[in-house]
């Protein structure tokens, strides 16, 4: 969804460190990771075989711990890939021991996350319709010099819809 916020575009990222980095910085790293994997898939015989990529100031280390579940660490460029992958695997093993497979956790929450994504998309569209309705109402008021009250406007209907969607999104 092109209109999604940065936070919404990061929803499929389960964990990110450092946690204080803003969404824009996280998205930049995510785009680098996705681009490198796409490049490796297109020209290198498969992105699933990619272990690491050496960048100017870091080394991106990849480890697929479950099908379609990728851990990516940015480490010192002088770090050993095998040592980093070993630490990644130990981290994953601790996760799995305490919480189970990541895929199982996601599957159990998939319906709720899909509903939330649909609600947020509907909310964005409703906000756009509300802006248009407000603009049209302002234009109509400029054209009319009547002080008579009118029945509920389309703006009021859309405003009510936005309010309901905001409540649904915040409750999820």
Image: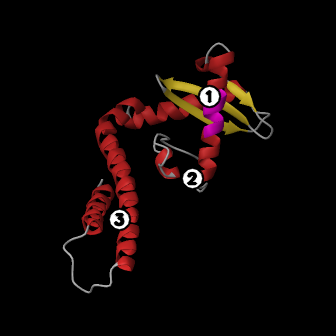
Q: Earlier in the sequence, mark 3 or mark 2?
A: 2
**Dot 2 corresponds to which residue?**
23
Which tag is nearer the camera, tag 3 or tag 1?
3
At label 1, counting other C-alpha atoms closer than 10 Å, the crowd grade (few under 14, some 14-19, many 20 or more) is: many
Q: Is residue 167 left or right of residue 74?
A: left
Residue at 67% across, 38% down: 74
Question: How far apart are labels 3 and 2 at the CA level?
Answer: 31 Å
Q: Earlier in the sequence, mark 3 or mark 1?
A: 1
Residue 124 % position (x, y):
39, 54
For residue 134, the mark is none
Question: Which residues make up the magenta segment?
Answer: 31-37
**Dot 3 corresponds to which residue?**
133
Give the SS element for disc 2. helix
Question: How far apart are labels 3 and 1 at the CA level?
Answer: 49 Å
Q: Residue 81 lies in magenta, yes or no?
A: no
Q: Please, is residue 11 above or below residue 90 in the view?
A: below
Foreground pick, 41 / 73: 41
For residue 62, the mark is 1
Residue 30 % position (x, y):
60, 40
Give the SS element for disc 3. helix
* Residues under numbered marks 2 and 1 in contact, where contact means CB atoms less than 8 Å apart: no
Q: Going by the picture, which residue comes out furthest to the top?
A: 45
């Amino acid at each position: 969804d092109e209109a999604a916020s940065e936070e919404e575009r990061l929803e499929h990222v389960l964990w990110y460190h450092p946690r204080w980095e803003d969404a824009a910085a996280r998205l930049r790293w995510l785009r680098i990771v996705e681009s490198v994997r796409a490049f490796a898939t297109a020209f290198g015989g498969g992105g699933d075989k990619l272990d690491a990529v050496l960048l100017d100031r870091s080394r991106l280390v990849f480890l697929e711990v479950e099908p379609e579940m990728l851990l990516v660490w940015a480490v010192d460029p002088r770090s050993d890939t095998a040592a980093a992958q070993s630490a990644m695997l130990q981290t994953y093993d601790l996760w799995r021991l305490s919480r189970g497979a990541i895929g199982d956790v996601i599957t159990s929450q998939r319906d709720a996350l899909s509903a939330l994504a649909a609600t947020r998309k509907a909310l964005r569209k409703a906000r756009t319709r509300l802006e248009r309705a407000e603009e049209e109402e302002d234009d109509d008021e400029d054209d009319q010099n009547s002080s008579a009250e009118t029945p509920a406007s389309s703006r009021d209907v859309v405003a009510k819809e936005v309010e309901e969607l905001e409540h649904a999104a915040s409750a999820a």
